Amino acid sequence: MSSTPRRRKHSVELPTNYVVNILRWNWSYSFGLNPVRRESDPFMEFRHLTVSGVLMLPQRHEDEKVELMVIPDQDLNASVRRQRVEKPLAVGSLGRSRGFSILQGYLSLPQDVLHTLLSMLVADRLKFVLLNGTRIGRGGARISSYRFCEVLRDDDLYESES
């Protein structure tokens, strides 16, 4: 028996592509007084877009229901984000909460893009959401990029999950 401790090999995690077929979407908005009386912001505003659909890729999750919460953030607007110092780990997440059968995702969106995105959804021009990130594990997946699109290209359907 060797007294030398074994070293774990660090595997390189390949990115995983997720393709969501959009079935429906919903936009909600609320505005009111902030119950936490902070002088900096006496109002509370809540707006988000919910996109529901089914996964087409990766195959191991094919036909699973997905609900994506797209949350606009003024700090992500191009003029503001250039001033950021820290490097973000992800633009969203995807995972399953305990007790829920559907996959739930949260995606940050620059607020100045919201109007265009909603206009395209109203016109029924967007059919898919493509997400790229880590493989779904116990803590979920970190999403590094995403895009909404009307049609899929051949390379969109490439399954990169190992």
Image: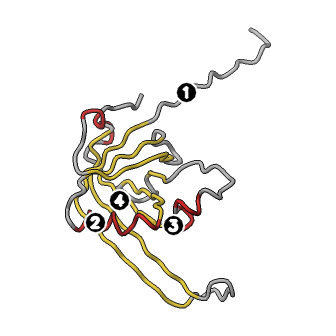
In the rendering, at what x and y percent does residue 76 appear? Answer: 53, 61
Q: Verify CB contact (< 8 Å) between mark 4 and mark 2.
A: no
In the rendering, at what x and y percent does residue 136 appear? Answer: 45, 42
Three-letter code, disc 2 = Trp
Three-letter code, disc 4 = Glu
Q: Verify CB contact (< 8 Å) between mark 1 and mark 4.
A: no
Compute the Cα span from label 2 to label 1. Answer: 35 Å
> In terms of sequence position, does the residue under pointer 2 or pointer 1 come before the other?
1
How many dots with numbers?
Answer: 4
Residue wearing tag 2: 25
Residue wearing tag 4: 67
In the rendering, at what x and y percent does residue 21 appear? Answer: 25, 51
Compute the Cα span from label 4 to label 3. Answer: 19 Å
* Residue found at the far front of this picture: 79
Query: In this orientation, does residue 34 appear?
Result: yes
Image quadrant assignment for residue 127: bottom left
Circle 1 Cα neighbour tier, 10 Å, few/some/many (<14 / 14–19 / ≥20): few
* SS for callout 4: strand
> In terms of sequence position, does the residue under pointer 1 or pointer 4 come before the other?
1
Q: Which mark is residue 73?
A: 3
> In terms of sequence position, does the residue under pointer 3 or pointer 2 come before the other?
2
* SS for callout 3: strand
Compute the Cα span from label 3 to label 2. Answer: 19 Å
Q: Verify CB contact (< 8 Å) between mark 2 and mark 1.
A: no
Look at the image and tell me in which quarter the N terminus lies: top right
> In terms of sequence position, does the residue under pointer 4 or pointer 2 come before the other?
2
Compute the Cα span from label 1 to label 3. Answer: 32 Å
* Residue found at the far top of this picture: 1
In the rendering, at what x and y percent does residue 129 appear? Answer: 32, 51
